[in-house]
Amino acid sequence: MIPRLISHKLQELIEQYPVVAITGPRQSGKTTLVKNVFPKRPYLTLEDPDVREFALDDPRGFLSAHPEGVILDEVQRVPDLFSYIQGRVDEIGKEGLYILTGSFNFSLMEGISQSLAGRVGLLNLLPFSFAELEQADRLPASLEDLLFTGSYPRIYDKKLPANEWYANYVTTYLERDVRTIKNITDLDAFQRFLKMCAARCGQLVNLSSLGDDCGITHNTAKSWLSVLQTSFIVFLLRPHYKNFNKRLVKSPKLYFYDTGLLSYLLGIGSAEQMSTHAFRGPVFETWVISELLKGRMNRGLKENLYFWRDSAGHEVDCIIERENRLVPLEIKSGKTITRDFFKGLKYWAKISKTTGQKAYLVYGGSMDQKRKEGTVLGWKSFAGTIPFTA
């Protein structure tokens, strides 16, 4: 097993709460994580029909069979179980009884908010971060290889061809997960919607345009986008509303959690194609944003990422909110630094009356620099340290 950075936070929460819940995309390594951190604890998956039938027919007996606690995988498959777990933890009054995992954020969070509020510690596990792959000496050979391969554990564990694995992943996701979440029957239309989202990665969300291109209504596009969010396929980066006396964009930007899945949906067939592909910029930007997210989530911290854009088109790719200050971060996929790279940071420094000492530029090259406009970080040094996520 490649060690997961979130393990430390998981061990900490199990001492503080009667229930710990771990959610994240399917195949992100949740089951492997909990089995390795707690090897002596009983493990049950509610994907198993026999186990699920026991939990449905006799929830009290099901939970009583493991008085010292148990790992329950895909617990959202039996929603009524949450209420019985509440009764057990209140009765026993002991920390670390139940470890719950699930792939669908909405289903899991709905059960937690209704029955387990105040009794549960929450963690989100995403696929491997750069730091985890680096520590395990499993990094792909180049940036292009990394972007194309993505970060899902099974690809690295079994040394599988990335495109083949993502093809099977999308098929499984459509045929099992999508039907479970929203009972969507037109899977061809939903797959087309998924690919259209990939083509808009890094752009402002326009539900009407997205719906028109897919032949669906605005409300259907909104509903389907929520499906992609709740199953950890995409996330929305919100705009920061600090005004500086300018009219600001209010729509969020769309990103994917994983660049390998994004590359597959964009039709990128190899790492070599990534070098010159028209979507190299959005894919690289997705990778940087997702690494920032992983840096927070692996520490059990809430998201603190935004972007900034005004109505005149001035923009900063990412704004990191830290205590009482905002850290601007520009993202450029090019390997050679040019003056244009600093346009957004210069404008931000002007309107916010800050200096380049508090700004960053991450790019696709390797040389780190200290410039008056900000600190320049090559992609490896950025991902290896991520100094501004805590």
Image: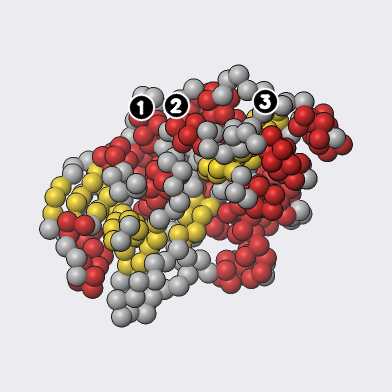
- In this picture, residue 18 sits left or right of residue 56: left
Q: Is residue 80 above or below residue 141?
A: below
Question: In which quarter of the view is residue 355 placed?
Answer: bottom left
Which residue is found at the position 57% from the left and 68% from the top?
207
Q: Is residue 25 visible?
A: no
- In the figure, is residue 294 to the left or right of 55? left
Mark 2–mark 3 contact, CB under 8 Å? no
Q: Nearer the viewer, residue 360 or 91?
A: 91
Point out residue 63 in the picture as x, y percentages from the top left corner: 76, 32
What residue do we see at 29% from left, 76% from top?
244
Q: CA distance from mark 1 to mark 2?
A: 8 Å
The amino acid type found where label 1 is placed reads: Gln
x then y, percent, for residue 89: 68, 38
- For marks 1 and 3, give the CA distance: 34 Å
Q: Nearer the viewer, residue 305 or 234?
A: 305
For the residue marked with disc 3, what is the amino acid? Glu
Q: Position of residue 3 (x, y in %)?
A: 44, 26
Closer to us: 169 or 229? 229
- Tell me the crowding category of disc 2: few under 14, some 14 to 19, or many 20 or more residues within 10 angstroms, Cα based: some
- 210 or 7, which is in the foreground? 7
Residue 197's spot in the image, x, y percent? 54, 57
Tags 1 and 2 in contact by the CB under 8 Å rule? Answer: yes
The nearer-to-camera label among 1 and 3 is 3
Q: Which residue is mark 2?
A: 3
Q: Which residue is mark 1?
A: 135
